[in-house]
Image (cartoon, rainbow, N blue to C red):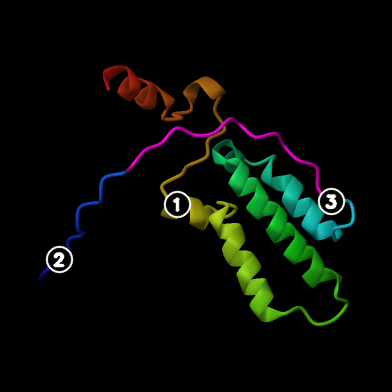
């Protein structure tokens, strides 16, 4: 029986992250479900990885979600699929996090491997 072997992963190009972004307020004019989703992002562990561009994308997704929910008509299947896809890119589902090997833990902040130690070591050695 032949087993499939995966190609070795390409090397990862690393760059320093931006400053930790502030948690923005949800637009009070958004649909309540969009507000709840947007606010939940910053109460979830994956927000540790968010950059300003991720927050900008989250605002856009929440806006699209709100418009779709506020139509008072049948929900657009195409827009729904786009919103769910974009939400997955923000690591909002367990499946999305597993695909990228991100595991959220309930341990204290000292137990979390942020990768910062390795990054600082590479700068010192570089």
Taking the view exactly as shown, the residue that stands out farthest to the left is: 1
Residue pointed to by mark 1:
98
Q: Does the magenta portion include 22?
A: yes
Q: In the rendered structure, which disc, 3 or 1, sits on the residue that comes first in sequence?
A: 3
Residue range (magenta): 13-27
Q: Quadrant of the N terminus?
A: bottom left
Circle 1 Cα neighbour tier, 10 Å, few/some/many (<14 / 14–19 / ≥20): few
Residue pointed to by mark 3:
27
Q: Looking at the rendering, which quadrant does residue 16 occupy?
A: top left
Spatial separation of the CA atoms under disc 3 and disc 1: 30 Å
Nearest the camera: 58 or 92? 58
Q: Is residue 11 left or right of residue 48?
A: left
Q: Residue at x 80, y 42 (%)?
A: 25
Residue 119 x, y percent position in the rendering: 37, 27
Q: Is residue 6 left or right of residue 94?
A: left
Q: Residue at x 74, y 65 (%)?
A: 65
Q: Looking at the rendering, which quadrant does residue 122 occupy?
A: top left
Kindly state the secondary structure of the residue where label 3 is placed: loop
Circle 2 Cα neighbour tier, 10 Å, few/some/many (<14 / 14–19 / ≥20): few
Spatial separation of the CA atoms under disc 3 and disc 2: 52 Å
Dot in front, 3 or 2: 3
Q: In the rendered structure, which disc, 3 or 2, sits on the residue that comes first in sequence?
A: 2
Residue 120 x, y percent position in the rendering: 38, 21
Q: Is residue 94 left or right of residue 29?
A: left
Residue 3's disc is: 2
Q: Is residue 66 above or below residue 74?
A: above
């Amino acid at each position: 029986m032949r087993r499939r072997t995966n190609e070795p992963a390409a090397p990862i190009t690393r760059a320093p992250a931006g400053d930790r972004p502030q948690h923005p307020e949800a637009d009070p004019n958004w649909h309540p479900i969009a507000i709840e989703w947007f606010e939940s992002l910053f109460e979830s562990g994956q927000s540790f990885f968010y950059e300003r561009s991720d927050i900008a994308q989250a605002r856009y997704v929440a806006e699209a979600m709100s418009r779709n929910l506020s139509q008072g008509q049948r929900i657009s299947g195409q827009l729904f699929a786009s919103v769910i896809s974009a939400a997955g890119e923000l690591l909002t589902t367990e499946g999305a996090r597993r695909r990228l090997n991100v595991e959220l833990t309930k341990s204290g902040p000292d137990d979390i491997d942020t990768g910062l130690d390795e990054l600082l070591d590479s700068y010192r050695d570089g």
